[in-house]
Amino acid sequence: MPYSKPVFDELAAQIIRAIAPRACLDLGAGAGKYGKLVRRECPDCRLAAVESHRGNIARFGLSQVYDTVECADVMSLFDTALDAEYDLVVAGDLIEHLRKSDGIDLLNFLVYRAAFILIVYPTRFLQGVVEGNRREAHISAWSALDFAWCEHTGVVAKGKQEIVVLRGFLPHAATIAELDRLMRGFAL
């Protein structure tokens, strides 16, 4: 579904405020929830989106939310975003739609092009094709173990949702320690 559950909306807003991105990429924008959060918290941020379902771009007015919207599969970034740099990349309810190997490849690609990667994903939430869109099917399961290869906050779980922030290689004033404190404060 192009919608995300609101479980971590306030925490995501806190993380966005702490990072204060000047440039942000929203992967699998769907209905534009994370773009709207970034726009609300950081109105001057250069905000880009990649959305694979052309119908969502018009249906949800994504061109009014983002500065640029590319209708493409996120894996096309390997060809189009080699020189891109972002303070924040958001993968909200995205990685479960990718083959595990593609998701890991994508995260490895992004750590070179981002200061932080915010990931929200469901656990044990069954979903197949939605409204004829095969890309809406959940095809991989994720857990904290999948992020052990890089610096990251603790994973916070609530209900059937989890959230984590990965530290990319680009310099930034915010630290993973301060983001982890935000995450732990939310989890209490």
Image (spheres, grey):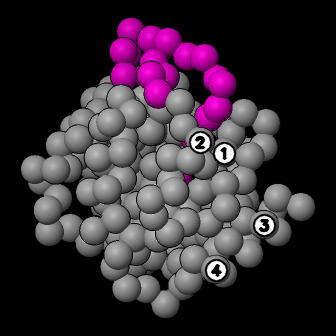
Q: Identify the mark at residue 177; answer none if there is no mark.
A: 4
**Residue on which the image places disc 1:** 162
Which of the two discs, 2 and 4, labels the residue nearer the N terminus? Answer: 2
From this view, report whether residue 146 is shown above or below residue 47. Answer: above
From this view, report whether residue 98 is shown above or below residue 76. Answer: above
Residue 104 appears in the figure: yes
Q: Nearer the viewer, mark 3 or mark 2?
A: 2
Q: Secondary structure at mark 4?
A: helix
- Which of 64/108 is in front? 108
Q: Identify the mark at residue 184; answer none if there is no mark.
A: 3
Which residue is found at the position 49% from the left and 90% from the top?
173
- Residue 10 on image: x %, y %: 72, 59
Query: Which residue ends up furthest to the right in the rendered image?
Result: 188
Residue 134 within the segment the image draws in magenta? yes
Amino acid at pointer 3: Arg
- For the residue carrying disc 3, how many other residues have a C-alpha within 10 Å: few (<14), some (14-19), or many (20+)? some
- For the residue carrying disc 4, how many other residues have a C-alpha within 10 Å: few (<14), some (14-19), or many (20+)? few
Which of the two discs, 3 and 1, labels the residue nearer the N terminus? Answer: 1
Which of the two discs, 3 and 4, labels the residue nearer the N terminus? Answer: 4
Q: Are marks 1 and 2 in contact (CB under 8 Å)?
A: yes
Amino acid at pointer 1: Glu
For the C terminus, the quadrant is bottom right
Which of the two discs, 1 and 4, labels the residue nearer the N terminus? Answer: 1
From this view, report whether residue 127 is shown above or below residue 157. Answer: above
| Magenta-drawn segment | 118-140
**Residue on which the image places disc 2:** 143
- For the residue carrying disc 1, how many other residues have a C-alpha within 10 Å: few (<14), some (14-19), or many (20+)? many
Please indicate whether residue 37 sits to the left or right of residue 188 in the image: left
Which residue is found at the position 60% from the left and 17% from the top?
126
Please indicate whether residue 54 sits to the left or right of residue 188 in the image: left
